[in-house]
Image (cartoon, rainbow, N blue to C red):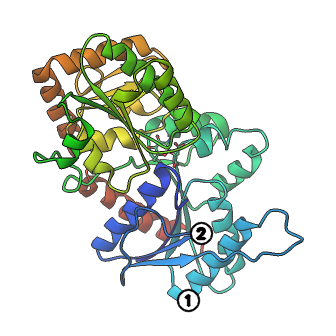
């Protein structure tokens, strides 16, 4: 197939999932055309089967805000014609679905272009459910030829907010070969020179991720045992985290490494993942960490209980319960055998349920079905 994929190139898990999906499809013989405002960060290599089409924006004094949605629709329609696309697959409903629907309608006299929308989370739970965006998001869902959601939780949330249920759940995935524990790790020596176990947090540091809770958890952990906190990523909450660590007198034991291209290296250098999010429709960071044999300490929200089995491969707690999360972390940090056991179970669960070989064929089958059933 010739598949057009649109993602947010720089920000968040939906861009990662869309990019990794494109790479996996290309490996299986399909040609993937990324249509986006910039080269997606996880797309490190372009080739004959993985191509990139940049959305060009015209700057004009009359436009106080550049009409990106229209520029994207124009590019989608052009690429569909020049590259003979079989379908468009957009990640994150707003505004990508609307652009795709516009593109499909603008060329329908001479080309069929089925549109698939994959919902990732905040496009439904926050943005889509905001009164101002609700009608247009509902329209985008209804007009898409196929809709997928990355968890059962998100499917149910979409039914609740939008009374729309034509949704296929295709969960996020992880490559077992890329995400696996490594024995030799120079980075670990750098992150924890004295060999203390490492708690790691990976996110875009938005308020919804509650990264300051990681600092609170860590402060409580340090009262009981030695450890290091490694914070990977960047966003508006990063300065609050650093400030809180200074106030608590624990800044020396925290390492803020900012955005990193190779998250897997940081996971392999760590022992436990902290994900105390306010909301998480799946928790891709948890899945990637589990594949690297890290037990997870996370909040019991959204789709996280579908990914993390409480007491088996991690511990779940109510949002904001930093005391319990710290107790769970201490339990794991002070019992190496338990930590290893839960880590191994985490990988088994990640691979048996979410490996690329299991999930990518589900997308391919969904594409084929949608192409067959979309109106002619
Ligand atoms: O909302 C975000 O944090 C970003 C968002 C995205 O679309 O980039 O993340 C969502 O999609 C990820 C990939 O499918 C999921 O793993 C995250 O759980 C989800 N985030 C939330 O629901 C808050």
Furthest residue in direction right, as rendered:
62
Q: Which residue is mark 1?
A: 82
Q: Secondary structure at mark 2?
A: loop
Q: Which residue is mark 2?
A: 37
Q: Which mark is residue 254?
A: none
In the picture shown, does residue 61 fall above or below 182? below
Which image quarter is the C terminus in?
bottom right
Residue 133 at x, y = what percent?
Answer: 74, 46
Density class for disc 2 (Cα within 10 Å; few <14, some 14-19, many ≥20) is many
Query: Marks 1 and 2: which is nearer the front?
Result: 2
Residue 305 visible in image: no
Q: Is residue 222 left or right of residue 60?
A: left
What residue is drawn where x is 55% and y is 43%? Answer: 235
- Ligand 1 within 8 angstroms of badge 2 C-beta: no
- Which of the 4 quarters of the picture holds residue 61? bottom right
Q: Are marks 1 and 2 in contact (CB under 8 Å)?
A: no
Cα distance between the residues tagged 1 and 2: 19 Å
Residue 119 visible in image: yes
In the picture shown, does residue 88 fall above or below 362? below
Q: Secondary structure at mark 1?
A: helix
Residue 58 at x, y = what percent?
Answer: 75, 77
Which image quarter is the N terminus in?
bottom left
Residue 171 at x, y = what percent?
Answer: 39, 46
Q: Pick whichever, 346 or 204, lies toward us.
A: 204
Q: Is residue 116 left or right of residue 343?
A: right
- Which of the 4 quarters of the picture holds residue 107? bottom right
């Amino acid at each position: 197939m010739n598949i057009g994929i649109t993602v947010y190139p720089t920000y968040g898990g939906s861009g990662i999932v869309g990019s990794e999906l494109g790479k996996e499809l290309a490996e299986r013989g399909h040609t993937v055309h990324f249509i986006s405002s910039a080269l997606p960060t996880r797309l490190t290599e372009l080739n004959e089967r993985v191509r990139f089409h940049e959305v060009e924006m015209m700057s004009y004094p009359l436009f106080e805000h550049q009409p990106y949605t229209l520029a994207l629709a124009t590019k989608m329609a052009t690429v569909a014609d020049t590259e003979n696309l079989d379908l468009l697959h957009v990640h994150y409903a707003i505004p990508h679905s609307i652009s795709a629907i516009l593109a499909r309608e603008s060329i329908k006299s001479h080309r069929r272009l089925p549109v698939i929308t994959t919902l990732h989370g905040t496009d439904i739970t926050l943005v889509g459910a905001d009164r101002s965006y609700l009608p247009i998001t509902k329209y985008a869902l209804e007009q898409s030829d196929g809709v997928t959601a990355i968890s059962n939780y998100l499917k149910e949330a979409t039914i609740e907010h939008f009374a729309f249920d034509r949704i296929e759940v295709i969960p996020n995935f992880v490559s077992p070969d890329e995400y696996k524990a490594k024995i030799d790790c120079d980075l670990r020596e750098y992150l924890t020179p004295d060999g203390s176990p490492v708690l790691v947090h990976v996110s875009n540091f938005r308020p919804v991720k509650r990264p300051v809770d990681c600092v609170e958890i860590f402060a409580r952990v340090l009262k009981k045992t030695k450890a290091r906190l490694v914070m990977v990523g960047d966003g508006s909450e990063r300065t609050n985290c650093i400030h809180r660590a200074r106030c608590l007198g624990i800044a020396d034991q925290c390492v803020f490494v900012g955005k990193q291209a190779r998250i897997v290296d940081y996971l392999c250098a760590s022992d436990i993942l902290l994900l105390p999010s306010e909301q998480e429709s799946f928790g891709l960071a948890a899945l990637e960490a589990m594949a690297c044999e890290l037990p997870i300490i996370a909040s019991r929200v959204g789709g996280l209980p579908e990914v993390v089995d409480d007491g088996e491969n991690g511990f779940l707690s109510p949002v904001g319960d930093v005391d319990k999360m710290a107790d769970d972390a201490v339990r794991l940090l002070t019992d190496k055998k338990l930590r290893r056991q839960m880590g191994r179970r985490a990988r088994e669960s990640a691979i048996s349920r979410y490996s690329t070989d299991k999930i990518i064929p589900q997308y391919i089958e969904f594409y084929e079905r949608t192409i067959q059933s979309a109106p002619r």
